[in-house]
Every structure is written in structure tokens, then in C-alpha cells.
Amino acid sequence: MMKNEALFSEINLGPYTLKNRVVLPPLTRSRSTQPGNIANDLMADYYGQRAGAGFMVTEGTQIEPRGQGYAWTPGIHSQDQIEGWKKVTREVHDKGGIIFAQLWHVGRVSHTSLQPDNAAPVAPSAIRADAVKVFIETGPGEGALADPSEPRALTTEEVKELVQLYAQAARNAMEAGFDGVELHCANGYLVNQFISEHTNQRDDEYGGSLENRLRFLKEIVTAVSDVVGSNRLGVRFAPLFESTDEDRVYLGLVESDPHTTYIEAIRLLDQAGIAYLSLAEADWDNAPDLPENFYQEVRETFSGRIMYAGKYSADKALRVLQAGNGDIFGFGRPFIANPDLPERIRNEWPLNDVDPVTMYGGTDKGYTDYPVYRS
């Protein structure tokens, strides 16, 4: 029996049977067609090449125009965007794959040039994001990193409207042919901004106590479940227990008590009966694993499938699987550079290295031109 064979047993996820436990996690690639942030044939090729995954989640796709924080990321709020995503889902399904759309809103992690009418980004509270850059277009196909703009606080009524925008984005995803949706609630973006004590200074029903800070999460989970079914819904968190000064794309926020914050959030998700919980671990060089008691309490708290990602190797995935802490595993950079990653893991074939220069934006180079293994 091959060393990694345990990663190739079937497993149920909601109504689906996954052929293996190797997942393509959400990875921003910024290849959408402009203007309009529309998924295209090139993106369909990229996802189709990786349909050997047991399960796939798209890059974050903004639920409304204000949800964008980086140039050239795709949306799922216009009819043209829905039609574009149909190319992707058709290609993946033709290859026998299962794909969920990740629904994304960046909140304050944006820039006026990315916002409708150059308005201020929206957020739970008017606190500017630091330790993060956004990516703005400076000309056709040209862009630059910039500091996020000062946000404005959403009114209570606007928060309730946003819940309905998530539900509409979920409807759009189902119309586009997706098998389900994942809510991006990690890495310091909008839902995480409501959850965090650092970014939520509201005094209405969405602020103050942890229960109130979790209310927006609870309401969007309920609204989206009503659209797609809770068994076709996943939620992603990035429960940071420490951070780093390393220069990188946004990590998110470290709570004063991350254990309690995230276990309470996970308890809420378990009560909602969602299909899976995705936890993105710290992934900088020499980043620590999550605390052992956190892994264990996550498993005790959540009865659905648990996915881990964040600099995972096959060895780490096997370790977490055999400890009983996780069920499926996202492999980010390795899946960018190796369209046939499941076969490479299964057969212990060597991996292509990822080209960091072509990660975001550009053409097929560093996107759909990585070779499959030839023995």
C-alpha cells in the first residue's frame, strides 16, 4: 500500500461523495476579464485542469461591487459574471469534479478606486486597516499595491441589507451551476471584521458582546442555508493565535482569546448544520501549528467535515487525518504549480515549484501552463 493512500479514500461531504481528500482551496489569481470582473475561458481551463481534486473551492468572488479589494478579482453579482462562471462549472463537471463558489466581501480592506463612485469602503466600524496592502489598477493590465482607504461604518439597516446580498450571491452561484458555496469569514475581511474585537466597535445588536459580534455570521449562514441548503454550505475561518512581521498578503487579526472566539463561532455553525468547516492555519515560514487542545475541541464541537489548509504537505495531512482532527485538506501553492497534484501525491512523484511572480494577474503563464508529470 502506498504511503499516502489514506488521503485517497472516499468521503461524503453533504450530498456529495468525494473521490479523495485532496482539496483545491480558494486561491486568489486575479485573471478575470475586464471590464466587469467576469470569469472566462482561461479560468475554466485552470479549474478544469485541477478537477482531479476530491473537492474544489473557487478563489474569493465578490458578492457585490463594494466587496472588491483587489483589481481583477471575479464577482458573482452581475448576469455577465454568472454566465462567465457557467463556463467554469461546466468544464469542472465535464471532468467529474465538484466545485463550490467562495463568497467574499472585503469590507474595509479596499480602496476608493475599487469602490462604486470612488466612495469609502464599508466596514462594521470606521477603523482603517493597517498591516495590509490592496491592489489597484493603474492602467489596462497594470496595477500597484496601495494602502487601504478610510472606511465608513455601516448602518444597522445596511448590515441587514448585506445579509440579503449574501443570499442573492448564493442564488447567483446556484444559477451558475456551482455545487454549493463557501462563506469567506477569514483573514480580516468583512465577516471577520464583525467578529473581531479589534475592528468592531459598534453599539447596536452587531457589536459589543461576542454573541453580538457573531450575529452577522449567524444571519448570513441562515440566509445562505435557506438558498442552497445547509448541506451545500461551508465556512472558512483563519483562527490566528499569533502573527508575523513577514511582508505578505493580509493575514487577519489575533483576538485576545482566539480559542473561545472561534470555538463559539464553530458551535454556532454546528447548530446550523453546515456541511464543512474550513480552517486556514498560519502559513508563514516556521509558523506554528494550531494548539493541540484547539484541534481537539474543534473536533468535539463540530460534527460536519473539517478541512485544514495552510502550507500543508501530504505528511502533515496524514498526521492530522490519523489523529482524527481533520477530514479533507487544502493544498494551495502545490496545486497552483501542479495541476495533477492528487496523482503526484498518490504516487509520490516530485512536485513543480510555484513561480511567485505569476501568482496574481497576467496571462496563461504561471496559470494554465504548469506541466503534468511525465515519467
Image (tube, grey):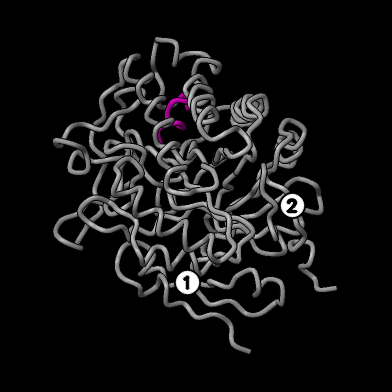
Q: Position of residue 105 (x, y in %)?
A: 38, 37
Q: Main secondary structure of the magenta part?
A: helix
> Looking at the image, which residue is at 33% across and 27% down?
123
Magenta stretch: give its range. Answer: 189-197
> Residue most toward the bottom?
375
Q: Which mark is residue 281?
A: none
> Looking at the image, which residue is at 52% across and 55% down?
284
Residue type, label 2: Ile
Q: Residues within 10 Å of mark 2 (few under 14, many from 20)?
A: some
| Left or right of 131, for residue 294 | right
Identify whether 22 is placed above or below 244.
Answer: below
The N terminus, quarter of image: bottom right
Do tag 2 and tag 1 residues touch (Cβ < 8 Å)?
no
Q: Which mark is residue 354?
A: 1
Observer-nearest residue: 253 or 4? 4
Observer-nearest residue: 196 or 3? 3
Identify whether 194 is placed above or below 245.
Answer: above
